[in-house]
Amino acid sequence: YAPARWLEKLACAKMLGQNHKEEFHNIAMEAPKTDPGGYALYFVDAGGHRANFASSLSHSCQGNVSSSLFVKDDGRLAVALHANRQIQTGEELAYDYSACTTNEAEWRSAICLCAAPTCRGSFVELVNLQELRSCFDRAY
């Protein structure tokens, strides 16, 4: 979704009284430099009807995979997963969600259980609005 369409979707859900936390399940990704449409920021609906196995990957503060957008041969954008290191047979695939929030309740409820040596204790980072930009800079 383009940012305006994602916000429109959330506003409609709120208007209809649907009480779900879909805004928590989106992923913001920048379009690749090879996208003929130029620079854009997209929201990937990880819980939508077109979600795939990657939508169910767990978080780890030291994930073994990362994601990126790429342009398919037909011009559509797709999400690719890349191994960050050698992955052992049977090892769970996980990635760092690199998520930020300004909502303290959301931050407190996002407890990380990855057990990585560098675990941050939460799979989202609590930031104020001024820090939000620096959070994105670190993650992207």
Image: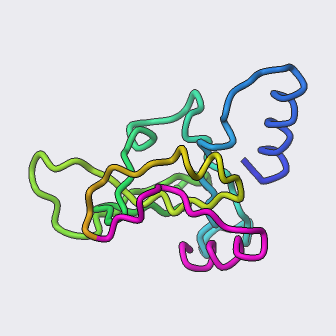
Residue 8 placement, left or right of 105: right
Residue at left offset 56%, top offset 59%: 99
Residue 137 sits inside the magenta stretch: yes
Q: Quadrant of residue 134?
A: bottom right
Residue 70 is situated, as x and y percent measured from the top left of the image, at 52, 62
Looking at the figure, which quarter contains the C terminus?
bottom right
Where 114 falls versus 36 (above or below)? above
Q: Which contiguous range is marked in magenta?
A: 118-140
- Residue 130 on image: x %, y %: 77, 76
Estimate the x, y position of residue 64 in percent, counting from the top left.
Answer: 28, 62
Query: Is residue 77 rendered to the left or right of residue 40?
Result: left
Give the left or right position of residue 65, taking residue 98 as reference. left
For the point 59% across and 42% down, the residue is 25
Q: Is residue 1 above or below residue 101?
A: above
For the point 63% across and 72% down, the residue is 136
Residue placed furthest toward the left: 89
Q: Residue at x 27, y 50 (%)?
A: 93
Closer to us: 84 or 69: 84
- Occupied quadrant, residue 135: bottom right
